[in-house]
């Protein structure tokens, strides 16, 4: 059985085949359409699945946004070019002719990382620091999705009541301070207009402003982890997303967390599946549901 796995992020769309032994092959990536109106996203998905015709028996999609009963609703429309109420499952089924399961990208990644760690831990929380900040919570071996599929949207917990307004409409969300978009949006002078990736490179080569932007993001994620430990008593945190996986970032968060009182401490791992955690999680979730 081959699963066509698709990961829809605010920056990129990825796809791959996941085989019977969970091996990943034929991975490809295209940019998320800049103005992700329904037609543009539908066209991008059609283009992506075209290459896999006849190669899979089911489709599993991990996507940014609230994914409830097959419908994608952006919580932070800024991350998806204003896209809202997109019939994701129906569109993917239309272009593939295959049964399809859809879930939030960070919920999917949490499931993948939990499956990898399940011999050690039953309570695992995944945090992606990427275009936005997303999360997925596994409690006692079960993925928490919630009655409206909203569970785990931890990027929209408040980090700073005096912080910038988030695209979701709240003030000072973790996402508005720590995400790749937030890092880029806060950059001034010589860093204005640069992406988070470029700002991390500048931080590595000693630019003070870049280092401060990265430290501010890591500090917000550290406080978020302290809050999650108090709420869930999670046994470990897994960090993913291109910002979360950037060189030295996890170590900064760990260093900050060590300054908090001991009950807030929790081990932090980098995602075992790296940038494929969403793809792998969607595929493993479809297997779990025996789709
Ligand atoms: P998505 O949000 O589509 O899942 P990513 O996880 O790649 O995609 O996150 C995209 C964000 O990560 C962007 O803000 C981008 O600038 C930033 N980014 C990409 N590569 C790096 C890197 N090597 N170091 C730091 N930030 C990065
Ligand atoms: C946002 C939200 C979450 C998502 C998270 C990470 C939207 C469109 N997305 O908080 O559903 O899990 O970003 O998404 O409202 P990514 O694109 O950064 O991977
Ligand atoms: Zn928000």
Image: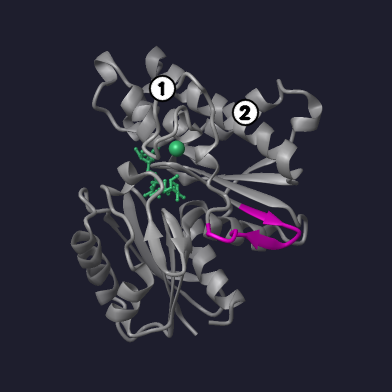
Asked if residue 138 shows in the view, the reply is yes
Pick the front one: 214 or 134: 134
Residue occupied by mark 2:
223
Residue position marked by numbered label 1 in the rendering: 203
Furthest toward the right, the residue is: 263
Q: Residue at x 50, y 32 (%)?
A: 174
Q: Whole-percent x and y of residue 281? A: 54, 63
Compared to 221, does 160 lie above or below?
Answer: above
Residue at left offset 77%, top offset 56%: 120
**Residue 144 among those drawn in magenta:** yes
As measured in the structure, the alpha-carbon distance from the residue carrying label 2 to the one carrying label 1 is: 22 Å
Residue 251 sits inside the magenta stretch: no
Q: Which residues are magenta?
A: 137-149
Location of residue 60 in the rendering, given as x and y in whole percent from the top left corner: 45, 72
* Label 1 neighbour load within 10 Å: few <14, some 14-19, many 20+: some
Q: Please, what secondary structure does the residue beneath circle 2 have?
A: helix
Query: First in sequence: mark 2 or mark 1?
Result: 1
Location of residue 181 by image quarter: top left
Q: Secondary structure at mark 1?
A: helix
- 259 and 154: which one is in front? 154
Which residue: 38% across, 84% down? 98
């Amino acid at each position: 059985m081959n699963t066509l796995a698709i990961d829809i992020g605010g920056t990129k769309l990825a796809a791959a085949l996941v085989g019977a032994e969970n091996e990943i092959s034929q991975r490809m990536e295209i940019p998320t359409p800049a103005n992700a109106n329904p037609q543009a996203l539908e066209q991008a998905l059609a283009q992506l699945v075209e290459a896999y015709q006849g190669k899979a028996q089911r489709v599993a999609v991990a996507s940014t946004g609230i994914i409830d009963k097959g419908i994608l609703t952006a919580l932070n429309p800024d991350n998806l070019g204003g896209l809202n109420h997109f019939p994701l499952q129906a569109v993917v089924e239309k272009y593939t002719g295959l049964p399809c399961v859809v879930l939030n990208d960070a919920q999917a990644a949490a499931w993948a990382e939990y499956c990898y760690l399940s011999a050690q831990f039953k309570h695992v929380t995944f945090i992606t620091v990427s275009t936005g900040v997303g999360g997925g919570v596994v409690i006692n071996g079960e993925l928490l999705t919630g009655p409206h599929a909203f569970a785990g949207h931890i990027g929209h917990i408040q980090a700073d009541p005096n912080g910038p307004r988030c695209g979701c409409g709240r003030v000072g969300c973790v996402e508005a301070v720590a995400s790749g978009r937030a890092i880029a949006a806060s950059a001034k002078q010589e860093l204005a207009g640069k992406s988070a990736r470029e700002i991390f490179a500048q931080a590595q080569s000693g630019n003070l402003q870049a280092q401060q932007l990265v430290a501010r993001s890591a500090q917000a994620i550290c406080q978020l982890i302290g809050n999650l430990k108090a709420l869930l008593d999670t046994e470990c945190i897994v960090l993913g997303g291109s910002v979360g996986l950037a060189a030295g970032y996890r170590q900064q968060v760990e260093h900050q967390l060590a300054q908090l009182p001991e009950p807030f401490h929790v081990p932090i791992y980098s995602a075992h599946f790296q940038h494929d955690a969403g793809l792998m999680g969607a595929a493993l979730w479809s297997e779990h549901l025996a789709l």
